[in-house]
Amino acid sequence: MKLSREEVLHIARLARLGLSDEDVETAREQLSNILENFEVLQAVDTDDVPPTAQSINLSNVLRKDEECASFTQEEILANAPQKEDDSFKVRAVLE
């Protein structure tokens, strides 16, 4: 599917993009190629493929929880831009 210059300009306007004439031509070629690839994919017969099919087996890769040493409060606060007593000091965001 080849896009026209007007269609690319319409898409750019919807996306709030300012495109030069050169950018419009580049986008027209690239978007047209993407749409042609989707046309090829639409030709693939997927009638016998369930909607939740996966090409690879899914599995959770989790490590065992292990207890380890933590940073001290001084180490945590060492790089804080502002601190007050033993806490981070941040600007109020709510009244």
Image: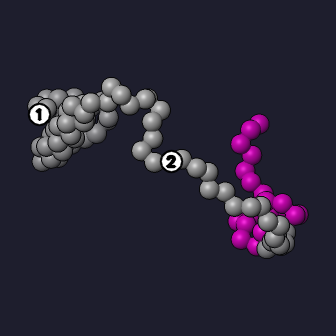
Residue position for label 1:
2
Q: Residues within 10 Å of mark 1 (few under 14, many from 20)?
A: some
At 78% from the left edge and 57% from the top edge, which residue is drawn?
89
**x and y percent of residue 17 in the render?**
28, 39
- Please say if 60 is above or below 32: below
Instruction: Specify the amino acid type for callout 1.
Output: Lys
Looking at the image, can residue 79 be seen? yes
Query: Closer to the camera, 41 or 14?
Result: 41
- Please say if 20 is above or below 43: below
The span shown in magenta is: 76-95
Residue position for label 2:
57
At 21% from the left edge and 31% from the top edge, which residue is drawn?
43
**x and y percent of residue 41 in the render?**
25, 36
* Labels 1, 2: front one: 2
Q: Are marks 1 and 2 in contact (CB under 8 Å)?
A: no
Instruction: Specify the amino acid type for callout 2.
Output: Asn
**x and y percent of residue 42 in the render?**
24, 31
Residue 80 painted magenta: yes
Examine the image and state in which quarter residue 5 appears. Answer: top left
Quadrant in the picture for the C terminus: top right
At 74% from the left edge and 61% from the top edge, which residue is drawn?
64
Question: Residue 52 vs residue 81: left or right?
Answer: left
Residue 34 painted magenta: no
At 13% from the left edge and 43% from the top edge, which residue is drawn?
29
